[in-house]
Amino acid sequence: MLALGKQFEEIAAEIQKLYNSASSHGHLEQIEATLGRLHPVETAIMAMPARTVAGLGVKARHAAYVMSEYWNGPIDRIDWDARAVRLLIEAVCESAGTPLPLHGAPDAER
């Protein structure tokens, strides 16, 4: 699971760099190819059971990546379901000792 987590982090970082580049439109094919590489890693993370706290952290970081819109605003301004998921993901990441994979600090928005 940890190896999958590392692969996920590396590929997600590549995608973020491509999106952040000044000419992301020129990188569309590269973004799509990189997303294609990410998909099997994400599928494997979701399919594999977490047998350790660190493995659970990998799953939580992936969930945070997939549900990143839950961190777009202050926690008191998102719906109840989103708040429950966000707080669960944050608690798991904190327990696992892994930071959230998001830009900005969600704790500052509370």
Image (spheres, rainbow, N blue to C red):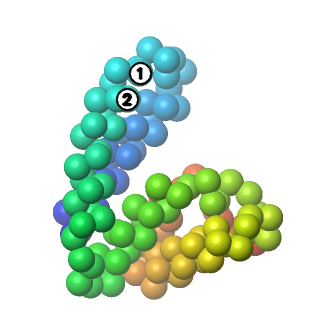
Expressed as whole percent of the image width and height from the top left, the position of residue 29 reads 35, 20
Q: Residue flagged by tag 2: what amino acid is it?
A: Ile
Answer yes or no: is residue 6 visible.
no
Expressed as whole percent of the image width and height from the top left, the position of residue 53 reads 33, 84
Q: Residue flagged by tag 1: what amino acid is it?
A: Leu
Front residue of 80 and 61: 80
Q: Quadrant of the N terminus?
A: bottom left
Q: Is residue 47 left or right of residue 74?
A: left
Front residue of 103 and 27: 27
Q: Is residue 90 left or right of residue 7?
A: right
Describe the element under mark 1 as helix, strand or loop. helix
Expressed as whole percent of the image width and height from the top left, the position of residue 43 reads 26, 56
Which image quarter: residue 74? Answer: bottom right
Tell me if mark 2 has few (under 14), some (14-19) or many (20+) residues whose alpha carbon lies within 10 angstroms of its own: some
Answer yes or no: is residue 86 visible.
yes
Q: Kindly identify the residue that appears in the image at 35 percent across and 29 percent down.
A: 32
**92 over 62 or under it: above or below:** below
Residue extending farthest to the top is: 26
Task: Verify CB contact (< 8 Å) between mark 2 and mark 1.
Answer: yes
**79 over 53 or under it: above or below:** above
Q: Kindly identify the residue that appears in the image at 23 percent across and 84 percent down.
A: 51
**Residue holding disc 1:** 28
Which image quarter: residue 69? Answer: bottom right
**Residue holding disc 2:** 31
Residue extending farthest to the right is: 77
Q: Kindly identify the residue that appears in the image at 43 percent across and 30 percent down.
A: 18
Q: Kindly identify the residue that appears in the image at 40 percent across and 61 percent down.
A: 62
Q: Is residue 15 left or right of residue 75?
A: left
Front residue of 39 and 12: 39
Q: CA separation, marks 2 and 1?
A: 5 Å
Q: Quadrant of the C terminus?
A: bottom right
Expressed as whole percent of the image width and height from the top left, the position of residue 100 reads 50, 65
